[in-house]
Image (spheres, grey):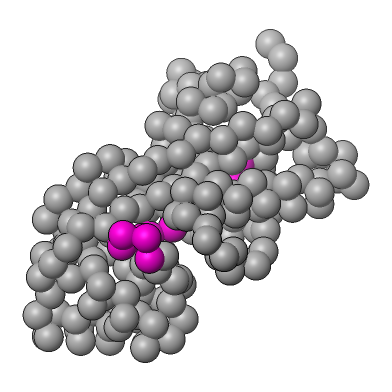
Amino acid sequence: MSERPKLVLASASPRRLALLQQAGLEPDLVRPAEIDETPRRGETAKTLAKRLAREKAALAQDTLFHDPEVDSAFVIAADTVVAVGRRLLPKPETLEEATGCLRLLSGRSHRVISAVAMITPKGEHRLRLADTRVRFKRLGREEMESYLASGEWRGKAGGYAIQGLAGAFVVKLNGSYTGVVGLPLEETVSLLRGEGYPVYLNWLSGGV
């Protein structure tokens, strides 16, 4: 049996790592790729998510050239963008930003665009996109203030984490739940399988 190819996750997100592991995929290396995520003028949510995912994958791959253990690995990167209409919501770092996000999301639907980019050992680039619609309940003052006080919003796309406390705000979701969390698993597994990565190896060996 040939040796399993290496897998690199280009993210520092514990959520993305946990999602990969949920699918029975254990990366050989986690290589965070820190890039400028500022949207360009006129950039849509889809365009931004795709560009950032590609840039993260490319940056991570660049760092592997001098590491013979993983210099011919599959590199996976992802990015998630939340939008209300054409307005792109930030990944808030301040209470003011988070408050603005919650007020926009309260009582209405929004889109969560998650792009997953892959670079194969042959240097080929692949990309898949998950477009999910999420609707929040109308948030009362106590709900908003309590969520803001939790600090869970910090650094999260749109100012919330659906797998956490904010899951109580969601009244409808149409699309990929794992995409909203940060890594759309169906799209990720499809990319890897399409290029011959043995996705189900751990499943068959009972190693999940």
Nearer to the camera, 35 or 64: 35
**Outermost top residue:** 1
The image shows residue 23 at horizontal and vertical percentages of 43, 35
Task: Name the residue: 47% across, 48% down.
Answer: 46
In the rendered view, does 115 fall on the left or right side of 164? Answer: right
The image shows residue 169 at horizontal and vertical percentages of 16, 64
**Outermost right residue:** 66
Task: Name the residue: 10% across, 70% down.
Answer: 138
Nearer to the camera, 207 or 201: 201
Magenta stretch, main secondary structure, is strand
In the rendered view, does 127 fall on the left or right side of 100? Answer: right
The image shows residue 159 at horizontal and vertical percentages of 35, 71
Magenta highlight range: 76-87
- For residue 154, what is the image quadrant? bottom left
Image quadrant in which the C terminus is located? top left
Nearer to the camera, 41 or 207: 41
- For residue 177, what is the image quadrant? top left
Task: Name the residue: 49% across, 45% down.
Answer: 115
**Outermost front residue:** 42
Residue 151 drawn above or below residue 181: below
The image shows residue 144 at horizontal and vertical percentages of 19, 81
Nearer to the camera, 49 or 163: 49
Q: Is residue 156 magenta?
A: no
Residue 149 drawn above or below residue 102: below
Q: Is residue 68 visible?
A: yes
In the rendered view, does 119 fall on the left or right side of 47? Answer: right
Task: Name the residue: 23% across, 77% down.
Answer: 103
Q: Is residue 85 magenta?
A: yes
Image quadrant in which the N terminus is located? top right
Residue 155 drawn above or below residue 108: below
Q: Is residue 9 visible?
A: no
